[in-house]
Amino acid sequence: MALGLALLTAGPALAQRDDQGLQLGCANDYFRLCAGVDPNSDDAERCMTRNRARLSPECRSAIGDYDKRTGTKSFKGE
């Protein structure tokens, strides 16, 4: 799946786009919140970040798992 879930504010966006856990956990949120945005663009990252309060529990869990695996903190200030 070439879904560009570049929703995180920390770390290289390309690695996030290639992360299968984020793709699986956040695909529905991406399509619900950011339909029409090129998934491989910086706009996708901005869209998901802008909508972070509306992310599903599944997506939030995938982000938490990603952070644990990579040592990043995706949403600064949270």
Image (tube, grey):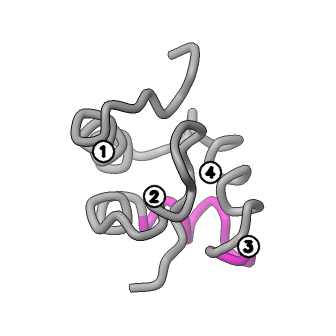
The secondary structure that dominates the magenta segment is helix
Dot 2 or dot 4: first in sequence order is 2
Q: Which residue is mark 2?
A: 16
Tag 1 residue: 66
Mark toward the start of the polypeptide (4 vs 1): 4
Type of amino acid at the residue the image marks with label 2: Gln
Seen at 30% across and 44% down, the residue is 66
Task: Indicate the quadrant where residue 63 lies.
Answer: top left
Q: Which residues are magenta?
A: 27-39
The alpha-carbon separation of the residues under discs 2 and 3 comes to 16 Å
**Element marked by disc 1:** helix
Quarter of the image holding residue 31?
A: bottom right
Q: What residue occupies the far top of the structure in this picture? A: 77
Q: Is residue 26 left or right of residue 21?
A: right
**Residue labelled with disc 4:** 48
Instruction: Name the residue type under label 3.
Output: Val
Assign a secondary structure to mark 2. helix
